[in-house]
Amino acid sequence: MAANGSEKQGAKAYYVTTPIYYVNDAPHLGHAYTTVAGDVLTRWHRQRGEKVWYLTGTDEHGQKIMRTAEANGVSPREWCNELVEGSWKPLWEHLEIANDDFIRTTEDRHTARVREFVQDLYDKGEIYQGGYEGPYCVHCEEYKSYGELLDGEGEEKLCPIHKKPVDMLKEENYFFKLSEYGPKLLEFYERNPGFIQPESARNEVVNFVRQGLQDLSISRSTFDWGVKVPWDDKHVIYVWIDALLNYATAVGYGSDPAKFEQTWPADVHLVGKDILRFHAVIWPAMLMANGLPLPGKIAANGWLMVGGEKMSKSNLTGIKPQDLTEHFGVDAYRWYFLRAIAFGQDGSFSWEDFSARYTSELANDFGNLASRVAAMVGKYFRGTLPAGGAYGPAEQAVMDRLSETVREADQKIGEELDFAGGIAAIFDFIKLVNGYLTEQEPWKVAKTAFPSGEDTTESRESRARLETILYTAAESLRATAVLLNAIMPASCEKLWASLGAEPEIGPLAEQRVAEAGVWGRLPAGVTVTKGESLFPRLQEPASEG
């Protein structure tokens, strides 16, 4: 998405990243959850008028990629190319992800800068040669301690996350002096209490660091699929050191000083809680060692759990995002996971819950409100939006709630990353407007507003009242389209077109969050049209088995 002209050109960009995803397989619901959250966050900040940079990408080195490629009879590079171009990028396009860049760790712009960064650490005495002997989970691409392993069959030891056997490594490696950064990290956490979110994640990291850090092996010497260690090409750089540096290399570290200065550091790293320690311990220690500013926030989201109820399709663990978007639509998909699951906490999903929420909130509350307002403007005023007349207590209540909703949604979504809370506030406003129409009964007012005989004082007063009611509802929808645009861009564009807003007040993408609460921006006289339903009734698939 291109920057618009109202942004402050000299200001630092609001820089948000997703993890770069490991391409051993096609993307699943968890990957999409984090990426949609980042897209909503960055779209929201764009609608604040800020300069924004949104980065995602893929992690393509390491032993797991090499083994997966070998098992499929192709080279690691061929495997990565096939997955990235055939699965990952198409899914982000399908889900309307407006990322500014997509970084691949096999790109020269990345690998050259990784070698420079590691060389700098080596030259500063932060890296030394030593030996490593111990457990390593290829699936996590992570060194494990014996204490965290699970017992398998016989003497076999299992990764606690994947429940699969770990490898027992014995290698001559290069080590980063991570142990020296424990006190510095604890001091930084103390001075920046919001650096790790949520609070439970911060507590976990602080307790981990307090127990004492071990120096980190940053190279591997038993395979060659990775970035070569610059001073010793018999080693490749440990995949996590390589991967974390994408956040810097993608915005010009070592290659474009002006861009780097305008973008770095990241304001928010969105990560899964399973990779929290890499981002909240190893990554800031690496940056400290090389004298670079640290990110503003590490925000760890929880895991998507399988609902206990049997879905009408196969079990959730095998479902792709496209299986859901085919039935519910892309906008509903984007909305549901952020609406139903508190960001930072584990959340359960079921087909039935998605269907129930879709019907109740999207189809009945939001979609039906848009349809009936457009229908009444068409029926009573031939599609021309009337001017609002004298506002009474009922209209003032709508205006007051709108102002509160804008403030609350902006704080929750834009600052706290409480997507569920922000979306709930917006839908509470939608419910209020629906209640307003139910109480004001414009269809009854219309009966005396347009008498079959002579026009009377009563009919003129009723007509003025009807105009006020319908303008209030339409203006509320105008504000709602702005507030939900970051979450459901395609549906809100349809609503914007239905309200006839663009010719008078400009494209929806250029509307500011703060202006959503400014009453009266939708001018009287615009042409309101009733288009297709924003959220059609679902046709539930036939039960399987």
Image: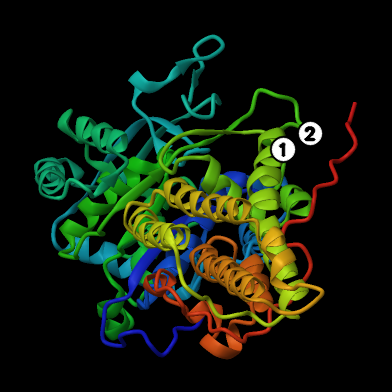
Front residue of 129/514: it is 514
Q: Is residue 476 above or below residue 205?
A: below
Q: How many marks?
A: 2
Q: Amino acid at mark 2?
A: Ser
**Disc 2 element:** loop
Q: Residues within 10 Å of mark 2 (few under 14, many from 20)?
A: few
Where in the figure is residue 70, as x and y percent of width and height?
67, 48
Q: Residue at x 80, y 50 (%)?
A: 537
Left or right: where does residue 180 sit relative to residue 367?
left
Residue designated by label 2: 314
Question: Which image quarter: residue 231?
Answer: bottom left
Front residue of 152/394: it is 394
Res. 185 visible in picture: yes
Q: Residue furthest top?
A: 154
Left or right: where does residue 217 sit relative to residue 443?
left
Residue designated by label 1: 318
Where in the figure is residue 269, as x and y percent of width and height?
36, 56
Q: Residue at x 38, y 60 (%)?
A: 400
Which numbered circle lies on residue 403? none
Query: Quarter of the image containing the C terminus?
Result: top right
Where in the figure is residue 65, as x and y percent of width and height?
58, 50
Q: Are marks 1 and 2 in contact (CB under 8 Å)?
A: yes
Q: Residue at x 78, y 50 (%)?
A: 327
**Disc 1 element:** helix
Q: Is residue 458 above or below residue 369?
A: below
Where in the figure is residue 378, as x and y percent of width and height?
75, 75
